Image: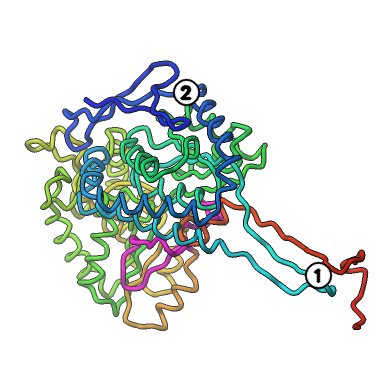
Amino acid sequence: MQNYLNFIDGEWVPAHSGKTYQTFNPADTRQCLGSFPDSDAADVEAAVEAAARAYERWRLVPAPKRAEILFRAAELLVQRKEPFARQMTEEMGKVLKETRGDVQEAIDMSYFMAGEGRRLYGQTTPAELPSKFAMSIRQSVGVCGLITPWNFPMAIPSWKLMPALVCGNTCVIKPAESTPISAINLVKTLQEAGLPKGVVNLVCGHGPQVGAPIVTHPKVRVVSFTGSTEVGRLVAQAAAPTFKHCHMEMGGKNVIMVLDDADIDLAVEGAVWGGFGTTGQRCTAASRVVVHRKVYQEFAEKFVSRARKIKVGNGLDETVEMGPSHSESQMQTVLNYIEIGKGEAELLTGGSRLTEGDLRYGYFIEPTIFGNVPPTARIAQEEIFGPVVALIPCDSLEEAIAIGNGVEYGLSAAIYTRDVNRAFIAMRDMYTGIFYVNSSTIGAEVHLPFGGTKNTGNGHREAGIAALDIFSEWKSIYIDYSGRLQKAQIDEYKGE
């Protein structure tokens, strides 16, 4: 068993208390993955102080030079993609194809933000008075507190770390307590790429003992959180008294709309990928499929048939299509929702834990589909975060859109149709941060903004250049070279 450490002020150190905890492979709980520091507020204090000291130097490093470190990190991640992906499958559970994609997102984000080091554009604009120059620039904010989830244990840390760093901030990151290895691998890569000590600090541990002190620390000026809406609400409340920048990326209850003119086979494949990819453990998972009644029966039969063929097992097996729930508690949550669903709708397939052979050592659930689900049913309204899909019939595009918008979340939506006019109507009327046409609800790319509306988030967006707005402040600058006092809005330009 490997013993992992916190990373504080450029050194790998144990928790101040000496306490540790262990993590286990969700596909085979007989495998202990390592021990980790069970940190507390004292470790957070040391990490924040290190970040605050490093900030005074790091903010003065030219942005292109900061970016060169990110570029070197990307190059190292390319070399280590396979071993990092295999470790991620062991600690998170999703299949190798998906963990390779997770590492690839970190690679893509590192390259993308490295490019922003030579941009970080502001504006220049004509001033309203003569002999006066006006412009705006981005400036760094300070110490950033980053709290990341277990389902994308390297990609999401990279979404936060890379834009924060290129903007000139320093960071304290708390990875999910159950998947710290992938974040540790990312931080080690940044260290090897030449990141100065104290610029990034990593503290392992649990939310109340580590996450809460990060959020409330007076020297932390930005909090970026990805996780559940319930915890996100607590984070926002804790950050509010000191007016910290606060970015929240939270839950989703995403919809695929299948119209009567859709390519049904294509829509089925999209629903399988959206509903059962990552075992349904994505905030963008397609947990609702609204299908026009004219094609409902055909779609349901093909969808159920395809779901029954999904091979479930240990993600290290290249032939496996779906891995386990991430933890026993998550598995139990999903099973509880399945029981709720049995009282609300028709169970078409699945619905049970898998315990045959070695599967009994993991947290495996059958791909599960409910049919003729009322739009107001709990399984159609609440985020389950598991391999459970609700099929909801509809009679029109307008009804599909109303059902799609009829939840508290607004992250991602998709439509399958051959009619470009109906596709554009849905694009316009679905109140989500992400929208797909003839594709599933998952698969965002790092150069476009990522985020949602309503209870999914607070309006800020990760990825793309939109992420820079989380981790920078705008400063407007006016330079008067007239040699005399000019009063904007009071003095009027009368010509020479």
In the image, what residue type sits under mark 2? Asp
Residue 51 in which image quadrant: top right
**Label 1 Cα neighbours within 10 Å, binned few <14 / some 14-19 / many ≥20:** some
Task: Indicate the secondary structure of the residue bearing disc 2.
Answer: loop
Front position in the image: 420 or 208: 208
What's the residue at 51%, 21% (across, down)? Answer: 42
What's the residue at 60%, 49% (across, down)? Answer: 140
Q: Which residue is mark 2?
A: 40
Q: Quadrant of the N terminus?
A: top left
Membership of 123 in magenta stretch: no
Residues at circles 1 and 2 in contact by the CB criterion of under 8 Å: no
Q: Position of residue 24 (x, y in %)?
A: 24, 30
What's the residue at 26%, 69% (across, down)? Answer: 267
Q: Which residues are magenta?
A: 432-461
Front position in the image: 207 or 105: 105
Residue 256 in view in this figure: yes
In the image, what residue type sits under mark 1? Lys
Q: Quadrant of the C terminus?
A: bottom right
Tell me if residue 224 comes above or below residue 202 in the rendering.
below
Question: Is 59 placed left or right of 263 in the picture?
Answer: right
Q: Position of residue 85 (x, y in %)?
A: 24, 47
Count the numbered circles shown. 2
Q: Position of residue 469 (x, y in %)?
A: 57, 56
Q: Position of residue 288 (x, y in %)?
A: 34, 58
Question: Is 250 placed left or right of 301 in the picture?
Answer: right
Q: Which residue is mark 1?
A: 132
Lower position in the chain sequence, tag 1 or tag 2? 2
In this picture the colour scheme is rainbow
What's the residue at 50%, 64% (across, down)? Answer: 431
Q: What is the C-alpha distance between the residues marked 1 and 2?
A: 53 Å
Residue 219, disc: none
